[in-house]
Each structure stands twice: as structure tokens, then as C-alpha cells.
């Protein structure tokens, strides 16, 4: 629902779109155009069905089967710009052994996402990796904005809802987190 409040008349890029939930909300919020990008053809086919099922205009959507990292780089090279970029990747940090690689991945996609935004554009970036805490995720976003050469602010921090309880002895159970950043 939150994404719909940012999508009025927006050109939206929904990365790691899976079955297109964010894209649906953006269409409902009045997005001019939504581009859903995912590596799974099956997920994209389900996203298309979701648009039709919800009586939304499939002409306002594209469903792109491609590696998101490669697609983002291509869009930056082309000089494309968006009003809203959504980055909701799968879990990057499966274990402490690959935490450094996961952090590079998060920072890379956020840098590319920031590079694709118009001034005043919004980035919604999420992580479902319990090993990447909110402070680290915020630092990765700050470094990504710096690397992209943009000035950005955090408009809102997002976190898992009450149906995803956090176990006191297991802080990694606080794993869903997100940032709403705006390029100023």
C-alpha cells in the first residue's frame, strides 16, 4: 500500500518484482508506467495475470525477464530515469560467511537505483537478510547515494509488521526492513 502513495503519475521500476505485488499497488496508485523486472518467467506471467485479475490496464505495464543487476546497469548506461525505483531482492545474506558479498550486492543495486532517479524521485529499498541490521542497511544506502553522486534523505524507515514477531534471543528474526529515500 505504501508504494501506491508515491506512484501518482510516476514512471515506476519494480526490481525483483516476483509476482508483481508492488507493481499492482503502484498501478492502483495511478502510476503512468510500471516496469516489472525479474529472472522468473513464471513469476512474471503470474504478475501479468494479477494485473488483469485486478482490472488494471496491462498497457501501462512491462514484464521484463532479465537479471536485475544487468538490467539496472543497462538502464543507467542508456540514461533512463524513473520517478520511483523499488528494490526488493531475495535474501542476499544466507550466512555470516557471505555477509560481505551480500552488502556489496545491496550497495550496488541501491547505487544503480539512485542513479536512475529523477530529482525528487523516490527509492524504496528492502532487505530480508536478518544478518543485515537496520543500521548497516542505512549505511549501505548512504554509501550508495554517495557513490551515485546524489543527495538523498530518508523519508521513512520501514519494518516488518507485528505478524512477524522478533525473538529476543534471536535478533536475526528482525529481518524485514526497508528505507524510503528521496533524491533532493
Image: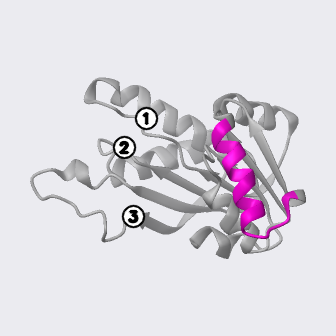
Q: Which mark is residue 129?
A: 2
Q: Mark 3: give few (<14), some (14-19) or many (20+) Cα within 10 Å.
A: some
* Residue 3 percent across, percent down from the top left: 62, 68
Q: How far apart are labels 3 and 2 at the CA level?
A: 12 Å
Helix, strand or loop at label 3? It is: strand
Question: Which residue is pictured at 72% across the width and 69% down the height?
Answer: 54
In the image, taking residue 121 as reference, residue 143 lies left or right, namely left
Question: Is 46 contained in the magenta span?
Answer: yes
- Residue receiving disc 3: 159
Q: Quick one: label 2 or label 1, which is nearer the N terminus? A: 1
Quadrant housing residue 146: top right
Label 1 packing within 10 angstroms: few (<14), some (14-19), many (20+): many
User: Does the stretch in magenta take in 99?
Assistant: no
Towards the viewer: 163 or 115: 163
The magenta region covers 42-58
Q: Which residue is at a point 75% across and 67% down the rendered structure image? A: 27
Mark 1 highlights which residue?
92
| SS class, disc 1 | loop
Tag 3 near tag 1, CB within 8 Å: no
Residue 107 placement (x, y as % from top left): 52, 38
- Looking at this view, name the residue that lies furthest to the right: 59
Q: Earlier in the sequence, mark 3 or mark 1?
A: 1
Question: What's the residue at 42%, 39% (across, down)?
Answer: 91
State how many labels appear. Answer: 3
User: Given contact means CB atoms under 8 Å apart, are the residues at marks 2 and 1 in contact?
Assistant: yes
Secondary element under disc 2, as helix, strand or loop, is loop
Chief SS of the magenta region: helix
Amino acid at each position: 500500500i505504501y508504494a501506491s502513495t508515491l506512484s501518482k503519475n510516476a514512471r515506476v521500476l519494480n526490481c525483483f518484482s516476483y509476482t508483481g505485488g508492488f507493481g499492482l499497488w503502484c498501478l492502483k496508485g495511478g502510476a503512468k508506467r510500471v516496469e516489472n523486472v525479474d529472472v522468473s518467467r513464471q513469476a512474471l506471467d503470474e504478475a501479468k495475470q494479477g494485473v488483469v485479475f485486478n482490472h488494471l490496464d496491462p498497457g501501462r505495464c512491462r514484464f521484463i525477464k532479465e537479471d536485475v543487476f544487468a538490467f539496472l546497469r543497462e538502464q543507467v548506461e542508456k540514461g533512463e530515469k524513473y520517478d520511483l525505483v523499488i528494490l526488493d531482492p531475495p535474501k542476499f545474506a544466507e550466512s555470516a560467511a557471505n555477509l560481505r558479498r551480500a552488502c556489496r550486492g545491496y550497495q550496488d543495486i541501491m547505487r544503480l537505483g539512485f542513479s536512475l532517479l529523477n530529482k525528487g524521485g523516490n527509492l524504496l529499498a528492502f532487505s530480508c537478510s536478518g544478518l543485515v541490521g537496520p543500521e548497516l542497511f542505512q549505511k549501505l544506502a548512504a554509501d550508495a547515494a554517495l557513490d551515485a553522486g546524489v543527495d538523498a534523505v530518508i523519508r521513512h524507515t520501514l519494518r516488518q509488521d507485528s505478524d512477524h514477531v522478533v525473538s529476543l534471543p534471536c535478533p536475526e528474526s528482525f529481518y524485514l526492513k526497508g528505507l524510503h529515500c528521496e533524491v533532493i
